[in-house]
Image (cartoon, rainbow, N blue to C red):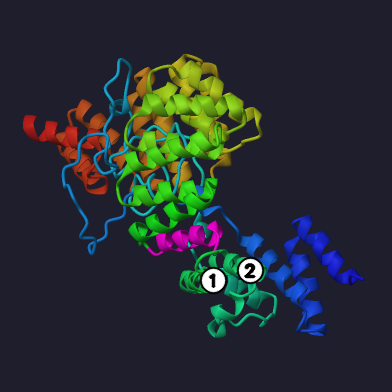
Amino acid sequence: MMDPSYYKALSLFRLRKYEKCIEICNQLMNQSPQLQGPWELKMRAMTQRVYVDDIEAEDDGVVDDPLDTEILATAPKPGTSLRTATAVKTGQKTAATRPRTSTGRPLTGLARPGTMQQRAGTSLLTGNRTALATGRINTARNIRLGSASIFNLGDNTFNMSRLNPSIFATKPAVAKILFQYLYYCEGDIKKSLDLCNAVMELNKTEAGWYWYTQKGRCLIAVGNARSAEYFLQYSMKLLTHPDTILLLTRAYCRIDQPLAALEVCNFGLQKQPDDVALLKQQARILELIGNLPASVNVYKQIIKLDAMNTEALSCIAVNYFYIYQPEMALVYYRRILSMGMNTCELYCNIGLCCLYGGQLDLVFSCFQRALRLAISAEQKADVWYNISFIGLHIGDLDFARRCLRICISLDGGHASALNNLGIIALKKENLTKAKMYFALAKKLLPENDEIKHNSRLIDAKY
């Protein structure tokens, strides 16, 4: 007969009340430390409490490895490398019309960690903030969260320094739970990798796709994407699982092989047609290499399968905005708003679409809501930067200058605001101030096309 307390803990786990579940497991383990059920349930609860899908969250792009000797070409062809991502020549507006990140890639519809860095030290967007942005996701960075959570509960049950992976390798069910705890909760990649090696060494012929995938995941986390490629490819031969495909595409992106990543996505979509996760990854890679029309087509396909996919809606909206169709972008942003998304960035985007779409009666109310929802100084700075475009739009340069100065007072490293202040100073024939603003902007964001062009222009003419 099942212990009523253990049954209650299981019910709380299913209800996602992990704190109460852990407390009951602690009580059961204090009464009888040898019970395996509460021990496993507690590990699962602690893992789920801090779990973040690292495949969705992490997007570091190309990683420079000074010890990598397998570099074949230093000047790859356009469209084949994430380092030299360029727009595909088509009849419509391309990536060249969009603001770019510090890595030279066009802004996407969703702010992701790593590849969306625009200003030094943050992952928030600058420029015309027409992307639906989210905060930085720190829990996917393999931070050691488990030790603090155990300490807060007054629990000293787990002693990871004495963990012997070979003991748990003989128990497949426990080994999987332990791996997830080590990887997601403790953030101990080395111990996780040791556990994978122990299981695979014990079952050399029947380790299963799961452990090959997890070993590839660990190798990617420690920066060894080339070694992870072999294990992930072998795992795909055993079972074509979406997680394996997504991890393999990430490994290829880390070693700057986006075309190979697209081939893997296409292979996965042949096996599992209309899988939204695979389609999103395909669209992201196309976006990163500059093939924006193809990326938008994939996002439109995602919308047909999942009409509430925020990433697809926001990416389509930002594409319409930058091909000078703000009315169409406004339709998608209002769709996101109707889904319950209530953020500073969203109202800022709607305000810009109303401004350039001619709906001037709604502009100030949208920006007022954006200011009320802004929490950090950087968010407030971005809102004031975008409000300055109202002054530029109606020709009131003094109003625009005041907005930009408020932006700089909130965030002194806002390069786009400094660039626009330089342009206003140049229009007022104040060359000294203009040169100073352009020099500061170039120092903060040296790869920005507009800032480089303005700096060269003022140096050549004056």
Q: Main secondary structure of the magenta part?
A: helix
Residue 20 picture location, percent across and down = 78, 66
User: Any magenta on residue 22?
Assistant: no
Residue 125 badge: none
Is residue 377 something one can see in this rendering?
yes
Residue type at mark 1 is Val
Mark 1 Cα within 10 Å, few/some/many (few <14, many 20+)? many
Q: Read off the residue under disc 1.
A: 199
User: Does label 2 or label 1 sit earlier along the sequence?
Assistant: 2
Residue 428 picture location, percent across and down = 22, 27
Magenta stretch: give its range: 207-222
In the rendered image, which quarter contains the C terminus? top left
Provide the secondary structure element on which disc 1 rests. helix
Residue 255 picture location, percent across and down = 31, 51
**How many badges with numbers are in the image?**
2
Q: Read off the residue under disc 2.
A: 172
Is residue 462 something one can see in this rendering?
no
The quarter of the displayed image where residue 2 is located: bottom right
Identify the residue at horizontal 56%, vertical 27% (top origin). Answer: 303
CA–CA distance between discs 2 and 1? 8 Å
Compared with 10, 106 (above or below) is above
Identify the residue at horizontal 31%, vertical 55% (top origin). Answer: 63
Compared with 370, 162 (above or below) is below
In the rendered image, which quarter contains the N terminus? bottom right
Compared with 402, 93 (above or below) is above
